Amino acid sequence: MKKFDLNIEKILENWEVKHAVREIIANALDEQKLSDTADIQIYKQSNEWIIKDFGRGLKYEHFTQNENDEKLNANGIIGKFGIGLKDALATFERKGVSVRILSKFGDISLGKSQKSGFDDLVTLHAYISEPSNQYLIGTEFHLSNLSDFDVEEGKKLFLKFSNESIIENTKYGAVLKKSGTQGKIFINGVLVAIEDNFLFSYNITLLNASIKKAINRERTNVGRTAYAGLVRLMLLECESEVVGTILSNDLSQFSYGNNHDELKWIDVQNHAAKILNKYKEVVFVTAEEVRQTDLVEEAEQGGKTVVVIPDNLRDKIIEENEKIEEPENKVQVFKEFVQQRNDNFEFKFIPEYEMSFSERSTFALKDKLFQIIGGKPYNVKEILVSETMQRDEYTFRPAVGLWQPSEQRIIILRSQLNNNSAFLGTLLHELAHAISGATDATRRFESELTRLLGIIGNKAITN
């Protein structure tokens, strides 16, 4: 029998038995992947728990490596530190779990012995004897005095044995459906962090420098700053309707302060809107727009899904829509919905001969108004009256007047003819648009409206 010192200088005092079980399972899973062999087995036989892989077999020389070059250079491998196995063995010894390791290269057990050259120091050693089964395929860890609870707790630290299911794969890793209320962060299938307010769980498989640095010897309590960037990139890679719907449903809780942490990233919010827009007839509205107009109900009755979003996301979508030429590729915010509705709107024009006597009298005042302001503007070809009217593009409420520069016409809502002042005020407002060529709330429009009011006021006073 040979023995050698495991040279474990620092014992991880905070490790529990489940962490040691995790390391044995991790090594077995890595060997399965590296050797492309059958699934590992974890089972109980008599009073022993056995963790078995079907790989190439463990040699005692593996204990002498602080880092395994093969694992360091392989993708998707859990273990990057050869010392993880030593930590597990030290934890088992400290917690009273007996260990036997079997492979075709020999049987290994643990025990305390004097350190070579230091007779006063007793350290943990591995004892190697001839293999009890020289035809054994793979490696078997036989663990005695190990509770069923600790085995199950150790298995929970792996995606393979969890109830999280993959929703969508990306080049950075997989977005997972949570099995409970907490989000879990896995790195190559090993649990490294818990997130209380994450919408999804995640398995990161493309490791950047930050992640590699954060995967410490203990593999626990990896901080969010290490993986947040990859989680964000993962979500931005997603294209499935499932992810888009879940994100958008959560986004709709934004105004109530109930959404999850991933939706605090504005680019993730924007991407969620794009995904949902790709698969569904959606109108994105703000909380203010919902309160101000009945058009939301009209959109829903028209078969559209209405999703409430924050103002800053609405502004970002509008900004990006302006860069998109194809209308079908634009994300439909409420302004776009109203515009589309207005583009398809049909006026119900009322010819003068169908107006009542009082309506005709009021409508005739337009000619006197033109005389006062110096004549009808050259670009106004028609003044029309309609029973129906488009929505105002700012308040989204039915307008009372409209200047259509492409048609070179002013349209007045018929109800304005019930009052001389209402009709003349609306007509002046639309004439200011026609003359200035500017929209509401602009300096040029306000200046022109002020000029017209000045002319009317002066005429009224001097007469």
Image (spheres, grey):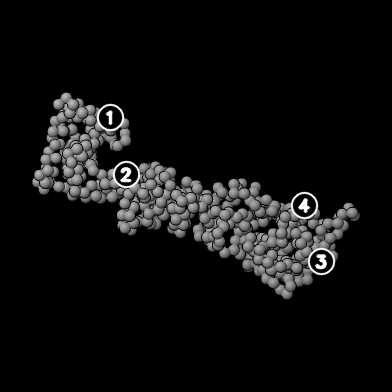
- Where is residue 146? Give x, y as percent: 73, 67
Q: Label 1, label 4: how many angstroms apart (C-alpha)?
A: 80 Å
Task: Tell me which corner region of the image, top left, top right, bottom left or bottom right, holds residue 441.
Answer: top left
Q: Label 2, label 4: how many angstroms apart (C-alpha)?
A: 69 Å
Q: Label 2, label 1: how many angstroms apart (C-alpha)?
A: 22 Å
Q: Residues within 10 Å of mark 1 (few under 14, many from 20)?
A: few
Kind of residue indicated by mark 4: Lys
Q: Which residue is mark 2?
A: 395
Q: Label 1, label 3: how many angstroms apart (C-alpha)?
A: 99 Å
Looking at this rendering, what residue extends furthest in the top direction?
462
Q: Residue at x 62, y 61 (%)?
A: 158
Find numbered disc 1 in the image and state the secondary structure of the residue it sits on.
Answer: helix
Q: Quadrant of the C terminus?
A: top left
Q: Which residue is mark 1?
A: 447
Image check: 118 left or right of 207?
A: right
Kind of residue indicated by mark 1: Ser
Residue 16 visible to the viewer: yes
Task: Please name which of the two marks, 2 or 4, marks the residue nearer to the observer.
Answer: 2
Find numbered disc 2 in the image and state the secondary structure of the residue it sits on.
Answer: loop
Q: Residue at x 59, y 63 (%)?
A: 162
- Where is residue 1? Give x, y as percent: 84, 65
Contact, mark 1 vs mark 3 (Cβ under 8 Å)? no
Find numbered disc 4 in the image and state the secondary structure of the residue it sits on.
Answer: loop
Numbered label tally: 4
Give the mark nearer the N terminus: 2 vs 4.
4
Q: Which residue is mark 3?
A: 129
| Closer to us: 49 or 206 | 49
Give the mark nearer the N terminus: 3 vs 2.
3
